[in-house]
Image: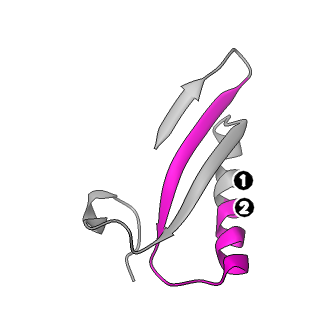
Amino acid sequence: MHIWQIDEKNINFEGHVDLCKDFKTSNADKIRREIEEVLKKFGITHATIQMEYNACEDKNIIKGVKNE
């Protein structure tokens, strides 16, 4: 995850989302849109989110994420 402020009004976010299931593209896109809505609440004005499946070896390093 990378977050940086371009100016006083623009904050960018880049991050990877490691999905716990092999979702269809339409389902993964729904998750991406939900994440973008949450990021807006924190003042993020632009987000680049890379969806992945089973890419992270140690999923326990991220707290608050339900590993199914």
Query: Disc 2 residue type?
Result: Arg
The residue that appears at 73% across and 35% down in the rendered structure is: 45
The residue segment tinted magenta is 10-34
- Answer whether labels 1 and 2 touch (C-beta < 8 Å): yes
Residue 57 x, y percent position in the rendering = 27, 68
Q: Residue at x 66, y 62 (%)?
A: 32
Q: Residue 62 lies in what quarter of the image?
A: bottom left
Q: How many marks?
A: 2
State yes or no: residue 6 in magenta.
no
Res. 65 image quadrant? bottom left
Q: Nearer the viewer, mark 1 or mark 2?
A: 2
* Residue 33 left/right relative to 59: right
What is the number of the mark on residue 8? none
Q: Which residue is mark 1?
A: 37
Residue 25, magenta (yes or no): yes
Q: Residue at (49%, 83%) from the top-left corner?
A: 21
Per the model, the C-alpha gap separating discs 1 and 2 is 6 Å
Q: Position of residue 1 (x, y in %)?
A: 46, 44
Does dot 2 land on a helix, a strand or a loop?
helix
User: Residue 31 location in percent, x, y?
Assistant: 65, 68
Image quarter hosting the C terminus: bottom left
Tell me: 32 left or right of 63: right
Label 1 crowd bin: few (<14), some (14–19), many (20+), radius 10 Å: few
What residue is shown with label 2? 33
Identify the residue at image location x=70%, y=15%.
8
Q: Is residue 44 above or below residue 35?
A: above
Label 1 amino acid?
Glu
Label 1 SS: helix
Q: Is residue 43 above or below residue 25?
A: above
